[in-house]
Amino acid sequence: MSTIRELLVELTGTTEYAEVVADDADLAASGIDSGDLVRLVLLVEQRFGVEITAEDMEGLRTIADYERFVAGRSVAGATGGA
């Protein structure tokens, strides 16, 4: 299970949602509420030490979007923010 999926389990308190939603499915359209989406952003920031701006949030709609975002920021941080 991906780390983003693990965070979804933490948020929802159940594995069912995280197991059935596709990587490219829009999370909001898949039944997660806006409050949980905000909490997901906060968890991602805390766990990965990244900052997610309002502009970034507009592009974070799917599990795959979050995974790419975190991977991109992790690489940038490891290389000095290039």
Image: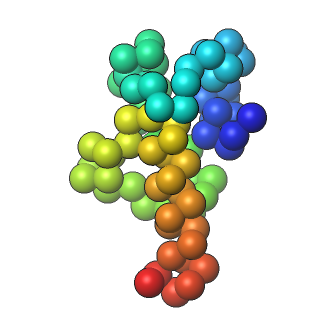
Taking the image as shown, residue 30 lies to the left or right of residue 59, namely: right
Q: Is residue 71 above or below residue 20?
A: below
Residue lying at 52% horizontally and 36% vertically, measured from the top left:
63
The x, y position of residue 81, in whole percent, is 46, 82
Q: Between residue 67 and residue 77, name the one nearer to us.
A: 67
Image quarter of residue 10: top right
The x, y position of residue 8, in whole percent, is 60, 29
On-image quarter of the N terminus: top right
Taking the image as shown, residue 59 lies to the left or right of residue 45, namely: left
Q: Between residue 49 and residue 29, name the one nearer to us.
A: 29
Taking the image as shown, residue 28 lies to the left or right of residue 4, namely: left
Taking the image as shown, residue 10 lies to the left or right of residue 32, namely: right
User: Across the whole image, how many numbered discs are drawn on residues?
Assistant: 0
Q: Is residue 81 visible?
A: yes
Q: Is residue 57 above or below residue 1?
A: below
Question: Please, which colouring scheme is shown?
Answer: rainbow
Residue lying at 56% horizontally and 84% vertically, measured from the top left:
79
The x, y position of residue 2, in whole percent, is 69, 40
Q: Is residue 45 visible?
A: no
Q: Between residue 26 and residue 13, name the one nearer to us.
A: 26
Residue lying at 51% horizontally and 76% vertically, measured from the top left:
76
Q: Is residue 10 above or below residue 44?
A: above
Residue sitting at the far right = 1
On-image quarter of the C terminus: bottom left
